[in-house]
Image (cartoon, rainbow, N blue to C red):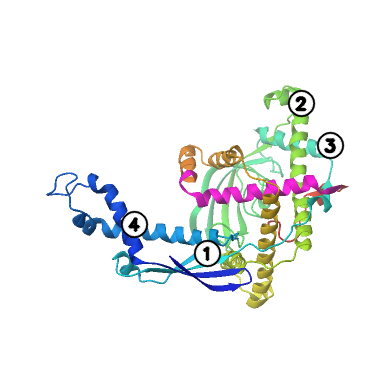
Amino acid sequence: MQVTEVTNEGLKREFAILVPRSALDAKVDTKLAEVKDKVQLKGFRPGKVPMAHIKKTFGKSYMAEVIDETINEAAQAAVTERNLRLAQPPRIELTAKADDLVAGKTDLTFNVTLDVMPEFTPVDPATLKLTRPVAEVPEDEIGKALERMADQQRSFTSKGEGAAAETGDQVKIDFEGKVDGVPFDGGKADDFMLVLGSGMFIPGFEDQLVGIKAGDSRDVNVTFPENYNSPDLAGKAAVFAVTAKDVLGADKVEIDDAFATRMGIESLDKLKDLIRNQMGADFARAGRQHIKRNLLDALDKAHDFELPQGMVDAEFDAIWKAVLGELEREKKTFEDEGKTEDELKAEYKKIAERRVRLGLVLAEIGRLNSLDLTQDELGRAVANEARRYPGQEQQVFEFYQKNPQALAQIRAPLYEDKVVDFIIAMAQVDEKPVSREELFKDPEGEEDA
């Protein structure tokens, strides 16, 4: 094997590799010899097929296999012999003609392009100063949660003839919707039970039914939202012919021990504790999002080193593809965003650089501190993913077993969170009391590394 260094600039390395045709032929011959006694061809007894005939019949398929193996082995050897730490997998470009290669007519030649890891010393986590916002679970929030639970358990009783519907009442209605006088799919129903104020229907529909009585008919004029899930209806005006058949009022639900028992909890106090703990977990997750953003900002500020261009380009391409897809879905242009295409590209290029930089920093801190995911941690993550597909759990497990790239997509955020938690545990963390509203405010900018 002949390896020639073509490029050595910054973090980029490129090698031209040549493997003689004779070496490929030798590997093919070895593989064919291993299966010679097992080959069965019409007209020959088992184990008696001439090697020349075997090579003529199976040589090309085995050559293709040998070429793939040789490329991987040669690329790995080029990395190992030079003690290179790669930032991402090698990029291979075949320079020989594929047909000639498989036919055994030419040497194997290809280029390997590598992005190596930059040399840098990550910041000591113990020197970082971070702020974690915290908030107590308000008692009135527990009361509101109980009220919502009671609403979900509430039954309704007819208010009788002549009763006008109010917000919070349930109405039994028939309706048919039309756009430009033409009925549309899904726009008609009979005996539909609708709670006014529930937000079940598009904006404006329920408000126009306040005051309706059993036996009344009225037209409800609404406009479908621009982001409505049916493109044929999005943004269009519609008229619904509605007839009320009954108006029902909500029955009072006492929030007491009996209510808790119906919810499967032994007492109201236990139910309140359960709600408080669940809300506390939500508050803790919200606080973690803020301190994680605080940490990522601190890491970004503390590091300045050359980035592997291939990684930046790949990250930018993924971001830009998502941006273009969103613009297309929302039927917007660059001008609608108030920026030119070049300005937006420059903006997202910086985001791509930040993500790559932070990814490398987190990976290096994890490596230096021997952090890794256990099989149990990864297994639990796959199990959680499988639960999203009831009845197909086994297929999901098999999918991840057979697709390392898909498994890597689950592993990456898990590993990042493990490193983030490690750094936060080592850092100097001050807790800052904030309001519930401030705690649940989205952190500005990019949250992910």
The image quadrant of residue 138 is: top right
Badge 2: few (under 14), some or many (20 or more) residues near its Cα, within 10 Å?
Answer: few
The residue wearing badge 1 is 180
The image quadrant of residue 357 is: bottom right
The residue wearing badge 2 is 270
* SS majority, magenta: helix
Asked whether residue 287 is in view, the answer is no
In the picture, measured across the screen, residue 399 lies left or right of residue 227, that is left
Alpha-carbon span between mark 2 and mark 1: 55 Å
Name the N-terminal-most of marks 3 and 4: 4
The residue at 49%/40% (across/down) is 397
The amino acid on which the numbered mark 4 sits, given as a three-letter code, is Lys
The residue at 67%/40% (across/down) is 162
Q: Which residues are magenta?
A: 401-430
At mark 2, the secondary structure is helix
Name the N-terminal-most of marks 2 and 4: 4
Name the N-terminal-most of marks 2 and 1: 1
- Residue 27: mark: 4
378 inside magenta stretch: no
Name the N-terminal-most of marks 1 and 4: 4
Alpha-carbon span between mark 1 and mark 4: 73 Å
- Residue 139: mark: 3
At mark 3, the secondary structure is helix
- Whether the residues at callouts 2 and 4 have beta carbons within 8 Å, the answer is no
At mark 4, the secondary structure is helix
Badge 1: few (under 14), some or many (20 or more) residues near its Cα, within 10 Å?
Answer: few
Badge 3: few (under 14), some or many (20 or more) residues near its Cα, within 10 Å?
Answer: few
Alpha-carbon span between mark 2 and mark 4: 71 Å
